[in-house]
Image: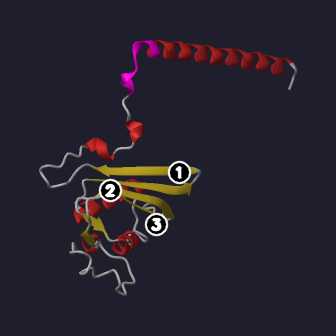
Amino acid sequence: MSTGEGQDLEILGSDVRGPIGPDRIETFAVPDLDEIEFTTEEVAAVCPVTGQPDAYSTSIRYGPSGRAIESKSLKLYLWSFRDRGIFAEHLAAEVAEDLVAAVVPRWLTVTLRQRVRGGIVTTVTASRPSTDPRPDSDYRDSDYRDTDDRDTDDRDTDDRDTDDRDSDDRDSDYRDTDDRDTEYQDTDEGSGR
């Protein structure tokens, strides 16, 4: 539900005590902003196979296109997953799709970091490119990606040659280590252990 300058928000200031669906996520008008980010440690769901609880650290970043997500409605929407069986990968994608539909941002990224389960931490990111309906929108897919996606092919040839030599040197170091391990094993076997 989209509203004006905030005066028509139904959930904020009301006594809502349970989860809400994506159709009730509220938004309000904002000036031209570069980015809004929400973070929370309180997103939870249930493994659809085992029924075990999954807890997530969550980051939601987006470039608003004139509207912002009202945080109480976002909190209640995220609460709706608490007892739902859903994999992290599907959860991130669904949250991204629902929020894009609610706020129509220039770009949006949802990152879920699942708390340790079986010694493994899972991090899932769902990014959505521009959905800005304005024809003069100059935002591209690359605007919502982290700078870690830089193209490394801009290096000159001399750097590549040096990197290859360094790699060869490292490989020979590993071979030397393997030889030492073999020598050590030979002495262990000879000692009767």
Q: Read off the magenta span.
A: 152-159
Camera-nearest residue between 90 and 42: 42
Q: Amino acid at mark 3?
A: Ala
Quadrant in the picture for residue 158 = top left
Relative to 189, 20 lies left or right? left
Relative to 188, 33 lies left or right? left
- Around disc 2, counting alpha carbons within 10 Å, would you say few (fewer than 14), some (14 to 19), or many (20 or more)? many
For the N terminus, the image quarter is bottom left
Mark positioned earlier in the residue sequence (3 or 1): 3
**Residue 154 among those drawn in magenta:** yes
- At x 40%, y 72%, the residue is 79
- At x 25%, y 81%, the residue is 7
Q: Which residue lies under the disc numbered 2?
A: 62
Q: Is residue 97 above or below residue 149?
A: below
- At x 37%, y 75%, the residue is 72
SS assignment at label 3: strand
